[in-house]
Image (cartoon, grey):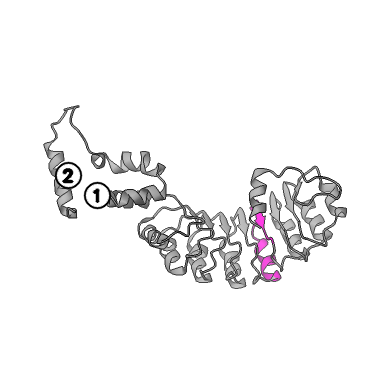
Amino acid sequence: MCSLQAEENHLASKAMALPRGDASSKVTLFEISWQDVLIPMVAEFLSLKELFNLRCCSQTAKRFVEAAFERRKDINVAGNNSRNIELAFAVLGKCCRRVESLHLARCHWMTDEYLLPILAENTRLRVVNLNECVNITPLALQPIIIECKELRILKLSKCQWLTTGAVDALTLHHNNLVEFDISHCTAIGERCLIMFFRKLNKLNVLSLANTPSVTDQVLIQIANYCSGLEHINLVGCAAISDYGIHVLTTSCRHLQSLMVHRCPNVTERVLAPLRGHLFIDRPQLGYNVPAIPGYINCLYLQV
């Protein structure tokens, strides 16, 4: 295979040899402007897999793909646990500089070693999905909490490593979250959640499914400070009751869906008046459950 310098000399010599103004002159792919044409018009429409396949073709292709990675705004490898995927992700960590959405749900190979480099170079993150990333630690959240000032969506479902200290740090640095998911996070205390929700007055979507520390007092804080809430998932929150649901639904007038399956202390006494006004995942006794709207169905299936 030609060396990098040899390929550059070859391309330069071909460029010099092209007759000016000759419309019939042939131009190779990589002689087209990268920044103005190839990256915005071609590379941005290729999947990560396709870009990595192209990267293997030559040294010039490798440089082109890495230049494309530098401008890429979305990285989605959710559920990808294929062989050597961590090596590919390490390349992204070295090249990416403008990522805004990072989707890593169910990446069981993900560790701090692979995650921290990409977080260090991408402080414009708006969406971070770490659902079921069980092998990272609270250390990986530090750059997200401290550096990513534009963060709007954070998903940490089934992250048992999430601690009260990490949530307290979020409380100090972020009040612009619009979507937050800490389902199945058992290490977080009630006091921590009460303090946290006092700052999230822009929250639209919230999932607290199977989080034992969610109580009526937590719901009262959500009602008082998150009045713009539209969707809330409380499946399996056994400590909440009719009182908390009543306060929540009275204050959150924009609420569109309420998921309270497996909440034994929430009864039809509070749910019956709400039916017909918002989606409730638990059917009324003797009635068929209504069709689940698409977006709400996605939330429900994560439980």
Q: Quadrant of the N terminus?
A: bottom left
At label 2, the amino acid type is Leu
Left or right: 252 in relation to 25: right
Q: How many neighbours does mark 2 have within 10 angstroms: few (below 14), some (14-19), or many (20 or more)?
A: some
Camera sees residue 67: no
Residue wearing tag 2: 11
Left or right: 74 in relation to 229: left
Residue 160 to residue 175: above or below: below
Residue at point 70%, 57% (across, down): 225
Helix or strand or loop: what does disc 1 sit on?
Answer: helix
Label 2 with label 1: CB-CB less than 8 Å: yes
Farthest right residue in view: 269
Residue at point 41%, 50% (across, down): 48
Instruction: Name the residue nearer the viewer: 274 or 49.
Output: 49
Q: Based on the displayed image, in which of its 4 quarters is residue 36 positioned? A: top left
Label placed on residue 60: 1
Residue at point 57%, 63% (across, down): 132
Comes first in the chain, label 2 or label 1 = 2
Left or right: 295 in relation to 56: right
Q: Quadrant of the C terminus?
A: bottom right
Q: CA distance from mark 2 to mark 1?
A: 10 Å
Label placed on residue 201: none
Instruction: Name the residue nearer the viewer: 31 or 145.
Output: 31
Rendered location of residue 43, percent (x, y): 36, 44
- Residue bounds of the magenta highlight: 190-209
Left or right: 268 in relation to 301: right
Q: Based on the displayed image, in which of its 4 quarters is residue 32 positioned? A: top left
Camera sees residue 54: yes
At label 1, the amino acid type is Thr
